[in-house]
Amino acid sequence: MKPFASEIWRSDMDRFKEATEQFYNKELSAKDYKGISGGYGSYAQRGGESSMLRLRLQGGRITKEKLRFLVHSIEKHKVNKIHFTTCQTIQYHNLKPAAIYAIMDQALNYGIVTRGGGGDFPRNVMVSPLSGVEQGEYFDVMPYAEEAGAYLMAFIKTVKLPRKLKVGFTNSDNNATHATFRDLGFVARPDGKFDVYSAGGLGNNPKLGVKVAEAVEPSKILYYIKAMVKTFVAYGNYENRGKARTRYMQDSLGVEEYVQAYQKKLQEVMQEEMNLDITVTPYEVKKQPDGVRVVGKRVIPQKQEGLYAVLYHPIGGTPDPMKLRKLYDLIKDMDEVELRLSPDEGMYIINCNGSEAEKVLKATADSGETLFETSVSCIGASICQIGVRDSQGLLQKLVEMERENGFADGVLPKIHISGCPSSCGTHQIGALGFHGGVKLIDKVPHPAFTLHINGCEEKGKEQIGEKVGVMLEESIPEFLKALGKTIEAAGTTYEEWIKDHQDTLRQLAEKYLA
C-alpha cells in the first residue's frame, strides 16, 4: 500500500497558503484559521505572530535520510525550538509563513507529509519504538504500522470524518502506544496475531478501548481499519465537536451495541473489498556486534546479540534543535543505525554496536538520567493557543527541585503534565499527572493544576487516573518535595512505596490542595 504521490499533497498547499496569508494580514480570525491550517499540520501559536509545523513520522521512525532533511531544514530556516510529541512526531516552532511553506514542500521529497497532522483526519500512526529490536517482543509490528499509515493517508482525500482518528500498534504488553485505549489499536499476541481494540482515548470523557476482534491475521489489518472508518462515519457525532471522538460512541450506542456495529461494518468491508490483504517485509538487522559490552541506565540491549539501543530523553521533549545535527554527524557512517521517537517524548538510537553505543551515550549527555527527569509535558500555554498553563515551565521547576534535593533515581516517579484538560501530556495515564487550569480564591484567578493519581498504560492493568483535587501551581514543587522526602525516609522507590501507602499519598496531597 503506497501513499499518495507527493504531487498530490503539493497541489493541496494553495488553500493553506491563501488562508495563512489572510491570517497574518489580519483578514482571518484565529478560530477560522485553525479550522483550515490544522489539516495541513500547522497551527498559529499564542499571540498569532508565528506558527508551528508538525512533521508526520510514521511510527516515530527516522532514517538517516529523513534525519539529514530535518537537520538541513532546521539550519536553513533557523528553527530555534523543536518538540518531540507524545504521538511520535516532531514539531517545529516559531516559524514564519515562508519557512512553513518551504519545509512542507521539501519534506515531501523525503516521504514526510504534514497533511493531516492536525484537523479532522487520521493522525500519525504510533508504534512501539523498539519494535523489531526489543527483547521479549511478540513480533515486529513496525512493517504493519507503516502499511496502515500509508493506507490511512488515502482517507484524507476521500472521507470526511467527524474528528481525528488515532491508530496505534504495540509489540508487547508494555503498551507504550496506548493501543488498548486508542481510537483503534492493534495489540500483538504471542501467537503472531493481533487483538483489536477501538473507541478509546484520553482527554475529556476518557475511555479504555473496547475489544472488537481477536486473533486477527496481520495480513488482514486494513480490513479492520476500513471498518473503523466506516463505523466512525456512520455513528460519529458530526454536530457536536466536543463529542465527535470515537470514545463517545461507547456512550451513544452502548458497549455491546458498539461492538455489534463495528462487526457489521467489518462484514460489509470483507464482502466489498477484495484487495486489502498485505504482505510485508520483516525488519531485519544484519549488523554484527564488535564485542564491546556496554551497560548504563540509558542503554538497552537489543534482541540482536551484542547490539544496543540508547535512550535520549531531553527534558520535556524539547532538545536544542542543533542536537539533531550532532546526532546526524555521529551516526551517518554507522551501519544500520536509525532513530525512533517514543510516545513519552524521548528518542532511541538503535542498532548500535558497543563502541557506537558509547559514543552515542557521550553525545546525549544532556538527556534526563533519572525516571523523574524523563517526565512528560506538552508544549504548554506559552506557545499553544488553547493551553491554560505553562506545563514546560512547571516541569523545569520540578526537575530543578529534584536535583536540589538529590533524590535517588526512582524516589519520584515519572509524571505527566498537560497544560489543559486535552491530555497532550497524557496526564491521565501517569502514576502522577497534572492538567492545567485556574483556581478562584476570593474571586481572584490563580494558576493551578488538577492532580491525577494511579494512571497506568500497561496491558491488563490499564487505568485512567483518578482526580484528587486542584493544587495551586506554586504548591506543586513543595508537594513533590514532601513526597520525595517521605519515600526517601522509607528507603525505597515510589513504585514500591505506593503499593502500601495509597492513604498516605492522599493525606499528603490533601495538605497542598487549594
Image (tube, rainbow, N blue to C red):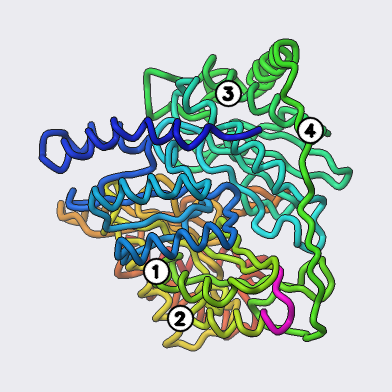
Front residue of 372/330: it is 330
Q: How many marks?
A: 4
Identify which residue is drawn at 28% across, 53% down: 99
Q: Which of marks 2 and 4 precedes in the sequence?
A: 4
The image quadrant of residue 499 is: bottom right
Q: Which residues are magenta?
A: 351-356
In what quadrant of the picture does the N terminus appear? top right
Looking at the image, is mark 2 or mark 3 nearer the viewer?
3
Residue at the (85%, 43%) spot, across then down: 192
Q: Position of residue 514 (x, y in %)?
A: 31, 60
Q: Which residue is mark 2?
A: 402
Q: Residues within 10 Å of mark 1 (few under 14, many from 20)?
A: some
State the mark number for residue 229.
3
Q: Earlier in the sequence, mark 4 or mark 1?
A: 4
Mark yes or no: residue 496 visible: no
Q: Position of residue 9 (x, y in %)?
A: 43, 34
- Residue 352: within the magenta? yes
**CA gap, disc 3 to disc 1?**
37 Å
Amino acid type at circle 3 is: Val
Determine which residue is flagged by label 1: 321
Q: Position of residue 154 (x, y in %)?
A: 54, 28
Q: Which residue is at the far left?
A: 26
Q: Secondary structure at mark 4?
A: helix
Q: Which mark is residue 219?
A: 4
Count neighbours of disc 3 (C-alpha within 10 A) and say few if under 14, some if 14 to 19, many if 20 or more. Answer: many
User: Which residue corresponds to the image point at 30% horizontal and 65% vertical from the top-left?
Assistant: 78
| Dot in front, 4 or 2 | 4
Dot 3 lies on which element?
A: helix
Up the image or down, 335 lies above or below 154; here it is below
Instruction: Of the two numbered discs 3 and 1 on the same chain, state the one appearing first in sequence.
Output: 3
